[in-house]
Every structure is written in C-alpha cells, then in structure tokens.
Image (tube, rainbow, N blue to C red):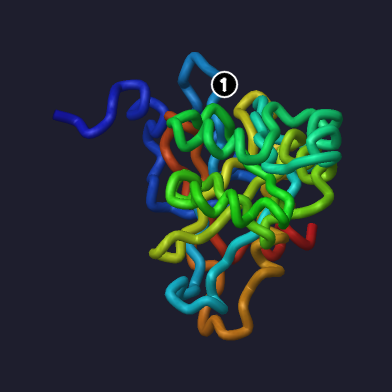
Amino acid sequence: MPKHGKKYRNAIGDRDTDVRVGVEEGVKVAVDNAFAKFDETVDVAINLGVDPKYSDQMIRGAVSLPNGLGKDVRVAVFCKGEKENEAKEAGADYYGSDDLVEKIQGGWLDFDKAVATPDMMAVVGKIGRVLGPRGLMPNAKTGTVTMDVATAVSELKAGKVEFKVDKAGVLHAPIGKVSFGPDKLLENLRSLLDTVMRLKPSSAKGTYMKGLAVSSTMGPGVKIDPLTVRKFLDS
C-alpha cells in the first residue's frame, strides 16, 4: 500500500524531493503542487540550530505579514472596564473578564487568538492549562499581553503570526493561502524570515538556519536551500 494518495504522488511527479532549491522556486513549486479543492494554507517549517531547553535559545515572537493570512481570525480579549469598549471598537469577537474565563472553564474555545491586559493575567492564569497547550495563552513577548488592546486586536485581525520553536528546534508558521500567488507569499515569507534571523541568540553555536521547507496543506513539501535565504532577504 502506498503511503500517499494518487493526487499527492502526481503532484510530486518526477521531482526529487531531496533536492534543495532556491527560495523563490520553492514557493512557486509549493503553489503549483497544491491540488485540493479548497484554498490551501501555505506553511513553512524552519529547522534552527538552537537548543530550546536553554531559555536564552528559545526562539519565540510574532510578525505582521504584509499580505495577511487570508482567513478570518477570531480574537478574544480578557479585559475590563473601558478596555472592553476599546476591544469592541477594534473588532474583537469576544471580550470580558471573569465571565469570559468561566465560559472557557465550561469548555468553550470558539476563538483563534487571545489578548489580555496585564491586570487580567492573574485571572487568565486560572485557565493556563487549557489555553497553553492550544497556543492560545496571551504572552508579552508576542504582544498579546498589553494595555494597547486596539493595536493588538487590529494586528491579529490583519494577519499577525505568532511562532515558537518546538522541542526539536523546529519552527512552524503559516504564510498565507495558495490563492495569494507566489509574489504575495514571498513577501510574507520575507517578513517571517527577517524576523527569525533577527532573533538569533548570541549563545547559539554553529549554523543557525539548518533547514527550510515549504508546503501547502495537502501538498508535498519542498526543501529550500538555507544558503539562499540571505540572498533572498538582501534582494
């Protein structure tokens, strides 16, 4: 029995999946290889030469993609008082304080991103075990714990992407939809790579960007030569 379906195998064709290509070619191939009937998301996986078990090598951050993500992002804001009106006017889908926490404790999780004002973090901490594993916990490093609720909500709605390396030192992030086309996806990828490069920790030894791959939701991955990243960023 083959590991992949006929459409997946046809998308690969005669291409050697072990060959690394340039950044521009890699994104174009990923777009061309998309075969699903829905508008697939294009994702990038970056293997970094860091050891996340050391706190100073934990690569974590956020970047606002110039062309957004092409999807509706539902934002919940933990706040109270005047900040609730600020959240509402900024376009937050849900907002509240203890009532919102209680709703989540009851099993409700119908949102994609969360923002919290600093004074609410003690309350939000009660549901940390629920939000944390799902990547929904507000964090100051990604700009989602802030008094500037309006800006945080607007950025998330516009396509701000949060990222964090896993235990193996691999970072995963979406860069848009197949329908964007190569040019817009490359603009988004440039913003992501530039941010990741700037976050390189001084304690990291050896090669920082060890590997890179781009793929659509259902399509095969395309390996990119990390040596072409600097040239791409400088172009």
From the image, tell me which residue sits under label 1.
39
Name the foreground residue: 215 vs 198. 198
Is 167 drawn above or below residue 112 in the view shown? below
Q: Is residue 11 left or right of residue 73?
A: left
* Label 1 crowd (10 A; few <14 / some 14-19 / many >=20): some
Residue 47 seen in render:
yes
Residue 22 drawn at (x, y percent): 59, 53
Q: Nearer the viewer, residue 27 or 106?
A: 106
Between 80 and 36, the one nearer to me in the picture: 80
Rendered location of residue 138, percent (x, y) = 62, 51
The residue at 72%/55% (across/down) is: 119
Q: Is residue 182 visible?
A: no
> Which residue shows up at 60% across the image and 44% down it?
25
**Left or right side of 10 for 222:** right
Query: Quadrant of the rendered structure where residue 115 is?
Result: top right
Q: Residue drawn at (84%, 33%), measured in percent from left and top?
A: 85
- Taking the spot 45% from the left edge, 75% from the top edge, the residue there is 51
Q: Position of residue 177 (x, y in %)?
A: 62, 30
Q: Is residue 51 above or below residue 151?
A: below
Could you tell whether 94 is left or right of 43 in the image?
A: right
Q: Nearer the viewer, residue 206 or 224?
A: 206
Quarter of the image that includes the C terminus: bottom right
What residue type is disc 1 on?
Asp
Look at the numbered disc 1 and give the secondary structure of its residue: loop
Q: Quadrant of the N terminus?
A: top left
